[in-house]
Each structure stands twice: as C-alpha cells, then as structure tokens.
Amino acid sequence: MRRHVSTTAEVVTFSAGAIVGAGLALLYAPKTGHEMRAKVGDVTEDAITKMKEVTAETQEKLNRNLRKGRDYAEEKVSALSSAAEETTETLH
C-alpha cells in the first residue's frame, strides 16, 4: 500500500516537473510576444488537463483502496463478533 502511494506521488512529481520544464523552454524560445502567449496558453491548458486526469485517477484508486480496507475491517469485526458469541455460548 505504501509503495503504491509513493509511486503515485512520483508520477505526479515527474509530470509537474516535465510541465515546468516545458514552460521554461517555451519562455526562452525566440518567438514574438503573441506567439509566446498563445504557446504558453496551450501548454498551460494541456498541463491543467493532464493534472486533472492524474488527480481523478489517484482519487479513484484511493477510494477503491479505502473501500477494500473498510470491507476487510468489516469482515474481521464480523468474524471476531461470531467467535465471541460462540465462546460466550460455550461458557454458559
């Protein structure tokens, strides 16, 4: 579980770094002001779209893992409750 969260953080960090690097490359490219603004706008829009996708995927994975954890905990509580009832019945 911990490795999965770490991997997700690494992917998000790498993506953010790539986007910043692309933005800096655009800023230092020899273009007119209008071309530069258009290019930066396009790159920014693409970056926002990609980050939203990564965020949605990460949220979905976390929710799925939370549901699995909740189901596992409920199973264990049920098993312990049944065992406690059986022990109580055996003692009486």
Image (spheres, rainbow, N blue to C red):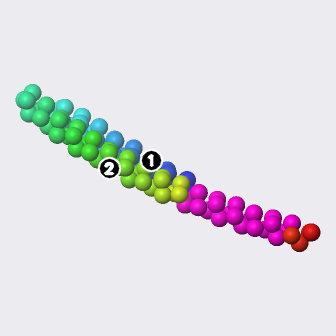
Q: Position of residue 75 (x, y in %)?
A: 65, 64
Please check the rendered image and state whether residue 49 is part of the magenta-colored stretch, yes or no: no
Q: Name the residue nearer the viewer: 30 or 82.
A: 82
Q: Main secondary structure of the magenta part?
A: helix
- The amino acid beneath tag 1 is Ala
Name the quadrant containing residue 46. Answer: top left
User: Residue reaching furthest top?
Assistant: 33
In the rendered image, is residue 3 in sight? Answer: no
Q: Name the residue nearer the viewer: 73 or 50.
A: 73
Q: Position of residue 32 (x, y in %)?
A: 7, 29
Magenta extent: 68-88
Residue occupying image coordinates x 72% and y 67%: 79
Q: Which mark is residue 75?
A: none
Position of 92 with respect to 73 (left or right) is right
Q: Which residue is mark 2?
A: 53
Secondary structure of residue under mark 2: helix
- The amino acid beneath tag 2 is Glu
Please check the rendered image and state whether residue 81 is part of the magenta-colored stretch, yes or no: yes
For the residues marked 2 and 1, what is the alpha-carbon distance in whole angstroms? 14 Å
Q: Position of residue 29 (x, y in %)?
A: 14, 34
